[in-house]
Amino acid sequence: MRHILAAAKSEFLILSRYPLNLFYNIIAALFSLLPLFYIAKIYNVEQAQYLWILSGSLFWMYISQALWTIGLSLRKEQEMGTLEQILMSPSNLIYIMLGKSIVTVGINSLTLLVGLLLIRYVFDCRINYALIVVVILISMPAVFGFSYIISGIVLKFKEIFAFLQVISGVLLIFSGVSQPATFLPYNLGKLSRFIVFEKMIYTFRRVVIDSASFLAIYSQLIYIFIYGFVLNIIAVFVFYYFKKKVMKNGDVFYV
C-alpha cells in the first residue's frame, strides 16, 4: 500500500507542477464531443440518437484515456531514465502502475463528471450519479487488466504505437461506441461478446439514457466484474512474462 501511495503522490506532484496542463487534461477531451451537443440542438435532430452516440463516446473517452495512460506509464518512466531505479528497488511494478492510475482515474473522473453534467442539463436526463460510480468501479478491474497486458508488450517491444493505434481502432469499432456492434457486417458483431468494453458502454448508456436501476443492470455488472477478475489474473502473468524477458535480455535498459 505504501508503494501505491508513493507512486500516486509522485504522479500528482508532477502534474500539479504544471496546473494549466492539468486543467487542459480535464477539459480538452470534451472538445471533441461538443459538436454533438450543437448538432442535436441547432438542427433539431432526433435527441435519442445523438444522446446514444454522445453517452457512448463519453464513456469510451474515459476508458481509453485510462487504458493508454496506465498502459504506457512504464514506457514514460523508461524514456525519462527512471525505470531502472524502480526495477532495482523492492517496489512491485504492478503497485507502481496502480499508484499512477489513481491520479489518472481521478483526472478522467472529473472530465467524465463535466460531460455528464452537460448531458444532464442539455438533454434534461435524470442521471443516477451513485449508480454511475458503481459502474465505473466495477469496470476498472477489466481496464487495469488490459493496461497490464499493454504495459508488458510496450516494455518488451517499446516503439509499437502504430500497432497500439490499430488495437485502439478495433476496440472502438467492436465496443459499439458510434454504432451498435450488431450492425457490423458478416456477423462480426458476435466478436463484441468477447470485448468487455461493449458491455461496459451498454451498461453506462442504460444508466444515462434509460435511468436504469441497479437491479436492471445487475446481470451486466456481474459479467463485467467476473471478466475483470479473470482478466487481471491472466494479465499479471502476461506482464511478468514480458518483464522476465526484458530483464533477462537487458532490453529494459534501452530506450
Image (cartoon, rainbow, N blue to C red):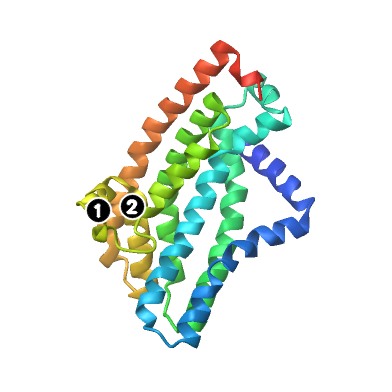
Q: Nearer the viewer, residue 180 or 84?
A: 180
User: Which residue is at 57% across, 45% downward?
Assistant: 69
- For residue 92, which quarter of the picture? top right
Instruction: Point out residue 210 in the picture as x, y percentages from the top left corner.
Output: 32, 75
- The numbered disc on residue 174 is 2
Q: Identify the mark nearer the N-term, 1 or 2.
A: 2
Q: Nearer the viewer, residue 190 or 233?
A: 190
> Judging from the image, what secondary structure is the residue with disc 1 in?
helix
Residue 173 placement, left or right of 100? left
The residue pinned by badge 1 equals: 189
Quarter holding the C terminus is top right
Instruction: Point out residue 116 in the picture as x, y percentages from the top left corner.
Output: 50, 71
Dots 1, 2 in contact, CB < 8 A: yes
The residue type indicated by label 1 comes to: Gly
Cα distance in 3D space between marks 1 and 2: 7 Å
Where is 14 relative to 23, above or below? above
Q: How many marks?
A: 2
**Residue 1 visible, this orientation:** no
